[in-house]
Amino acid sequence: MIVFQDEDGAIICSIPSKSGGGMYLVRVYSSANQMVVEHTCPANQFKTACSHIEQAVGIWKMLHPWEFYPWMPQKEIICARKHVVLRPHWKQIMGKGAGTDATEYSRDR
Ligand SMILES: [Zn+2]
């Protein structure tokens, strides 16, 4: 999974579809007591819980563990149907190639 961060501090997870036909982009951000998950997919069109939300929330928790300490307010997960479009200025923070500096690499060789 490739994870991006946008200028608002939200994270966007790129999750391959089960059929292998493409990617779902799922955007997550949190406020004091809410986590908002935005995406569209066939499952959530019918108000069915889908694994994308679970996966995106899991990534957020991994990157922001302090927000989930037992003494922190419990967050309500809000799912919004919103089509997320990949933007060129998003910063890739996880996934294949993350954390490698290509310029550094070419200088060594
Ligand atoms: Zn979904």
Image: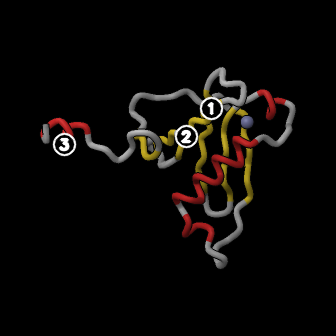
Mark closest to the chain's N terminus, 2 or 1: 2
Quadrant housing the C terminus? top left
Q: Position of residue 12 (x, y in %)?
A: 55, 40
Q: Which residue is mark 2?
A: 1
Which amino acid, mark 3?
Glu
Q: Position of residue 108 (x, y in %)?
A: 13, 41
Mark 2 element type:
loop
Q: CA distance from mark 2 to mark 1?
A: 8 Å
Q: Is residue 42 above or below residue 91?
A: above
Which amino acid, mark 2?
Met
Residue at image coords 58%, 54% = 60
Q: CA distance from mark 1 to mark 3?
A: 30 Å
- Looking at the image, how many numbered discs can be counted on the residues? 3
Label 2 crowd (10 A; few <14 / some 14-19 / many >=20) = few
| 56 to the left or right of 102 | right
Q: Which residue is mark 3?
A: 104
Quadrant housing the N terminus? top right
Q: Position of residue 2 (x, y in %)?
A: 51, 39
Mark 1 element type:
strand
Label 1 crowd (10 A; few <14 / some 14-19 / many >=20) = some
Disc 2 and disc 1 in contact, CB within 8 angstroms = yes
Q: Position of residue 100 (x, y in %)?
A: 31, 44
**Which dot marks residue 51?**
none
- Image quarter where ligand 1 lies: top right
Foreground: 83 or 42?
Answer: 42
- Place residue 90 in its image quadrant: top left
Mark closest to the chain's N terminus, 3 or 2: 2
- Place residue 69 in its image quadrant: bottom right
Label 3 crowd (10 A; few <14 / some 14-19 / many >=20) = few
Q: CA distance from mark 3 to mark 2?
A: 24 Å
Q: Which residue is mark 1?
A: 16
Residue projecting furthest to the front: 109
